[in-house]
Image (tube, rainbow, N blue to C red):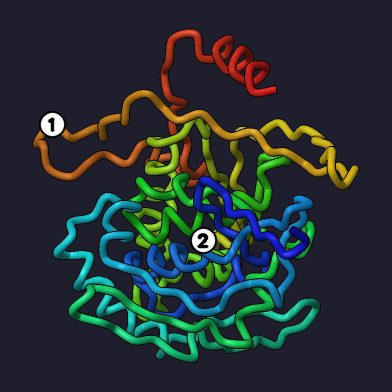
C-alpha cells in the first residue's frame, strides 16, 4: 500500500518554473504538444496524497499516434507524420535554461533515447538525467495545470504565453522584457526582428486566441525607454485561491479555481475589402493591445454562483 501510485483522471502538466521560462530551441507547435503530452504522463501522487519524488517518476514512455490524435483532435494520418518528425527533434533539440541569480545559462537535452516505430505508429522515449530535476514536483517551485486547457490553441506563441501567465494567476499581472518574451515564446533570432511584427504576429495573436477561449480579459501595456519598447505588462483576471486540507496528511494546499471558457468563439473583425483581419486597437500603439471582454448574459452572477458550487 505504501508504494501505491495514483494517477490523475485528467492529464496534468508538472514542470519547474525555470523550465517554463526556458527556450525550447527549434520546437514548433506540434513538437511542443508532443513534449507536453509526454510530460503529462510523469505526474501523480502516492496513496497519502503526496506528490511523487524524483526517483518515483517513470522516465521511459511510449506515445502512440492515436494518443496524439485523441488528445489534440488531430487527423490520425498527420499524427503519424508529426510523431516521426518530433522523434528526431526530441534527440537533437537543446533546451536553454537561465540559472538562478546568474547570467549563466544551462543547455540540456530532452531525451537520451527516442525511437520511432512505423508499424505501431508510436515513439518510445527516455528522458535525460538532466531534465528530470525540472520535471520533479517540488512544492511551490513547479507549475501545474491541466493539459486540456491548452488543447484548443493553434499557435506555439499562444500556448507558451498561456503557460507563462499561469505563474501569476493569483496576482493577475505579469511583466516581461521583450528579450524574455522572445526567448520563452520560442521566437527564432532570425524572425520577427522588427518589434511591430513581433507584437502583431506573436503578442496580439496570442492575446486574441486566449481571450477567444477563456473569459480572461487579457490586455497588455507597453513599457518604454524613450521611444523604444523594452518590456510588456500583461494584466488579466486573477483567480480565486482556496486552502484545502488533506484529511490523510493533515497538510493544507492551495486549490486554484479556473477561468471560465467563453460560450462562443469571437469572430475576427474584417476590413471592408474582406481581406486581412483588423487588429483591435492597433492604432493605439502607445497603449498596446486592449481586447474587449467577451459578452455573456449574466456573466458576473453566473461566475459567482459557479464559484460557490465548486466549493
Label number found at residue 50: none
| Percent of width and height locating residue 4 | 69, 60
Secondary element at tag 1: loop
Which quarter of the image is occupied by the N terminus? bottom right
CA distance for labels 2 and 1: 45 Å
Instruction: Tell me which numbered mark, 2 or 1, is placed earlier along the sequence.
Output: 2
Q: Identify which residue, 126 or 280, lies in the foreground.
A: 126
Give residue 204's position: percent from left, percent from top: 40, 48
Using the image, determine if residue 214 lies above or below residue 88.
above
Image quarter in which the C terminus is found: top right
| Camera-side mark, 2 or 1 | 2
Which residue is at 65% across, 86% downward? 105
Identify the residue shown where x is 72% and y is 41%: 171
**Number of marks:** 2
Q: Which residue is mark 2?
A: 40
Compare residues 31 and 265 and report the one nearer the observer: 31
User: For the view shown, which residue lies furthest in the front direction?
Assistant: 1
Q: Is residue 170 above or below residue 154?
A: above
Q: Is residue 133 left or right of residue 150?
A: right
Q: Secondary structure at mark 2?
A: loop
Question: Can you give x and y, in whole percent of width and height, for residue 101 in the image?
Answer: 80, 78
* In front of the other: 31 or 299: 31
Q: Is residue 200 left or right of residue 163?
A: left
Residue at the image position 40 percent from the left and 36 percent from the top = 213
Task: Please give the residue where the numbered disc 1 appears in the rendered image.
Answer: 272
Q: Is residue 278 left or right of residue 283?
A: left
- Asked if residue 267 is positioned above or below residue 246 in the image, the reply reads above
Q: Toward the viewer: 26 or 37?
A: 37
* 218 shown above or below 222: above
Amino acid at each position: 500500500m505504501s508504494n501505491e501510485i495514483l494517477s490523475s483522471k485528467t492529464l496534468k502538466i508538472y514542470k519547474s518554473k525555470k523550465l517554463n521560462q526556458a527556450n525550447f530551441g527549434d520546437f514548433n507547435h506540434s513538437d511542443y504538444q508532443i513534449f507536453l503530452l509526454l510530460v503529462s504522463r510523469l505526474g501523480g501522487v502516492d496513496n497519502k496524497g503526496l506528490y511523487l519524488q524524483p526517483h518515483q517518476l517513470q522516465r521511459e514512455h511510449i506515445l502512440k499516434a492515436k494518443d496524439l490524435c485523441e488528445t489534440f483532435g488531430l487527423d490520425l494520418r498527420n499524427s503519424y507524420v508529426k510523431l516521426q518528425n518530433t522523434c528526431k527533434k526530441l534527440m537533437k533539440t537543446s533546451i536553454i535554461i537561465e540559472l538562478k541569480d546568474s547570467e549563466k545559462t544551462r543547455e540540456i537535452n530532452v531525451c537520451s533515447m527516442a525511437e520511432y516505430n512505423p508499424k505501431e505508429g508510436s515513439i518510445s522515449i527516455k528522458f535525460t538525467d538532466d531534465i528530470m530535476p525540472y520535471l520533479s514536483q517540488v512544492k511551490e517551485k513547479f507549475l501545474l495545470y491541466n493539459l486540456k486547457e491548452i488543447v484548443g490553441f493553434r499557435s506555439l506563441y499562444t500556448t507558451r504565453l498561456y503557460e507563462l501567465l499561469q505563474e501569476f494567476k493569483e496576482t493577475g499581472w505579469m511583466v516581461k522584457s521583450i528579450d524574455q518574451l522572445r526567448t520563452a515564446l520560442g521566437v527564432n533570432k532570425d524572425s520577427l526582428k522588427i518589434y511591430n511584427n513581433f507584437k502583431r504576429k506573436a503578442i496580439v495573436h496570442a492575446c486574441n486566441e486566449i481571450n477567444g477561449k477563456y473569459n480572461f480579459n487579457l490586455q497588455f501595456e507597453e513599457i518604454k525607454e524613450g521611444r523604444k519598447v523594452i518590456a510588456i505588462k500583461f494584466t488579466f483576471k486573477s483567480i480565486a485561491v482556496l486552502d484545502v486540507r488533506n484529511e490523510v496528511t493533515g497538510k493544507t494546499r492551495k486549490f486554484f479555481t479556473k477561468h471560465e471558457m467563453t460560450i462562443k468563439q469571437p469572430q475576427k473583425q474584417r476590413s471592408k475589402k474582406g481581406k486581412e483581419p483588423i487588429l483591435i486597437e492597433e492604432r493605439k500603439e502607445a497603449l498596446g493591445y486592449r481586447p474587449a471582454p467577451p459578452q455573456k448574459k449574466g456573466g458576473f452572477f453566473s461566475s459567482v454562483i459557479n464559484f460557490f458550487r465548486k466549493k
